[in-house]
Image (tube, rainbow, N blue to C red):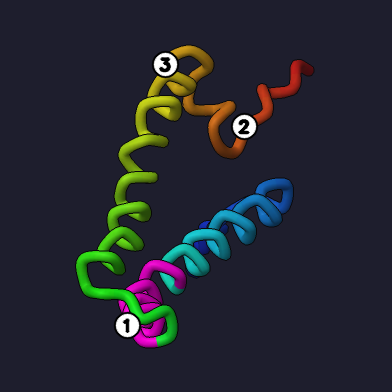
C-alpha cells in the first residue's frame, strides 16, 4: 500500500495555480530583460550607460517595494499578503 499525500486541497487549487503561473511568468520576464535591453539599444539608438537604466529600474523597483511590503506584513501579517487560509470550521 502506498500513502499518497495530496499537493494541495481542492479549495486551494486555483490560488496555487495562479501563484505558480505568476512565478513562471515573472521568471520569463526577468530572463528576457537582457535580450530586450540589447534590442532597445539598437532600435532606440541608446548608449550602454543609457540602457543600463532599464536594469536599474527593475532592481530599483525591488528595493522601493520592499519597504511598503515589509510595513504591510508587519501591520497585517503574512496571511493577508498572499493566500489567506480560512479558519477551521467549528463543529
Bin the neighbour count of mark 3 within 10 Å (Cα to Cα): few under 14, some 14-19, many 20 and up.
Answer: few
Residue under the point 39% across and 85% down: 39
Q: Which residues are magenta?
A: 29-42
Contact (CB < 8 A) between labels 2 and 1?
no
The quarter of the picture where the C terminus appears is top right
Q: Is residue 2 above or below residue 35?
A: above
Q: Identify the residue under disc 1.
A: 38
Q: Is residue 5 left or right of residue 51?
A: right
Dot 2 or dot 3: first in sequence order is: 3
Real-space Cα distance between discs 2 and 1?
43 Å
Residue 30 appears at what percent x and percent y?
38, 67
Residue 70 appears at what percent x and percent y?
38, 25
Q: Identify the residue under disc 3.
A: 74
Q: Is residue 75 magenta?
A: no
Give the number of the mark in front: 2 or 1. Answer: 1
Real-space Cα distance between discs 2 and 3?
18 Å
Q: Residue furthest left?
A: 49
Contact (CB < 8 A) between labels 2 and 3?
no
In this view, the residue in front, 90 or 20, is 20
In this view, the residue in front, 68 or 46, is 46
Q: Secondary structure at mark 1?
A: helix
Q: Secondary structure at mark 2?
A: loop
Q: Identify the residue under disc 2.
A: 85
Dot 1 or dot 3: first in sequence order is: 1
Q: Is residue 85 above or below residue 90?
A: below
Residue 38 appears at what percent x and percent y?
32, 82
Bin the neighbour count of mark 1 within 10 Å (Cα to Cα): few under 14, some 14-19, many 20 and up.
Answer: few
Residue 78 appears at what percent x and percent y?
48, 27
Real-space Cα distance between discs 1 and 3?
40 Å
Bin the neighbour count of mark 2 within 10 Å (Cα to Cα): few under 14, some 14-19, many 20 and up.
Answer: few
Q: Is residue 67 above or below residue 2?
A: above
Amino acid at each position: 500500500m502506498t500513502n499518497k499525500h495530496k499537493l494541495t486541497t481542492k479549495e486551494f487549487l486555483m490560488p496555487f495555480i495562479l501563484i505558480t503561473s505568476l512565478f513562471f511568468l515573472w521568471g520569463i520576464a526577468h530572463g528576457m530583460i537582457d535580450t530586450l535591453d540589447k534590442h532597445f539599444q539598437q532600435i532606440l539608438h541608446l548608449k550602454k550607460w543609457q540602457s543600463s537604466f532599464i536594469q536599474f529600474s527593475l532592481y530599483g523597483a525591488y528595493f522601493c517595494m520592499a519597504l511598503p511590503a515589509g510595513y504591510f506584513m508587519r501591520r497585517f501579517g503574512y496571511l493577508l499578503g498572499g493566500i489567506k487560509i480560512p479558519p477551521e470550521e467549528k463543529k
